Image (cartoon, helix red, strand yellow):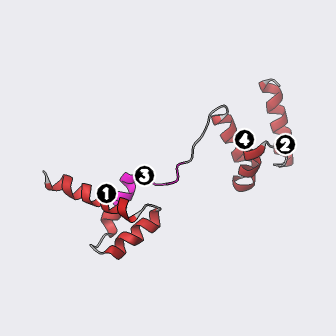
Amino acid sequence: MKEGEIRQVIDIDKNLKRCATLNGVYETMSEIIGFDNVVKLYDYFKGSQINFPTRLFSKEFVLKEALKSYDGTSESINLIASKFSYSERTIRKLLKEHIDKNHKR
């Protein structure tokens, strides 16, 4: 099927707002984020393999947020870890590295 033919099929399906005609994961994604958004993702990423990391937030961002709310207690470490889906050990390590780095200056 040529690009123009694919576009026609997508336009037809888009008008009907059906996701049952989509292949595997595209159908599931369509149910979650909507047909139009799946078509946008398809247009941008088709042919690519995408890996979704387990953690949504970067370590840099988590450290920044941890520095705002860490009060020196294990409880605050636990809350930070839970909030950002990191282990308590990782949060402790990030904080320690930050402290060590800033004390060397």
Residue at coordinates 39% horizontally, 58% vertically from top-left?
62
Classify mark 3: residues with Cα within 10 Å, few (<14), some (14-19) or many (20+).
few
- Which residue type carries mark 1? Leu
Mark 3 = which residue? 58
Residue 30 in percent (x, y) is at: 74, 50
Looking at the image, the residue that sits furthest to the top is 2
- How many angstroms separate mark 2 from mark 1 (CA)? 48 Å
- How many angstroms separate mark 4 from mark 2 (CA)? 10 Å
Q: Quadrant of residue 95?
A: bottom left
Classify mark 2: residues with Cα within 10 Å, few (<14), some (14-19) or many (20+).
some
- How many angstroms separate mark 3 from mark 2 (CA)? 37 Å
N-terminal label among 1 and 4:
4
Q: Is residue 50 left or right of residue 11?
A: left
- How many angstroms separate mark 3 from mark 4 (CA)? 27 Å
- How many angstroms separate mark 1 from mark 3 (CA)? 12 Å
Quick check: is 101 in the magenta stretch? no
Looking at the image, the residue that sits furthest to the front is 89
Height in image: 65 above or below 41?
below
- How many angstroms separate mark 1 from mark 4 (CA)? 39 Å
Mark 4 = which residue? 39
Mark 1 = which residue? 94
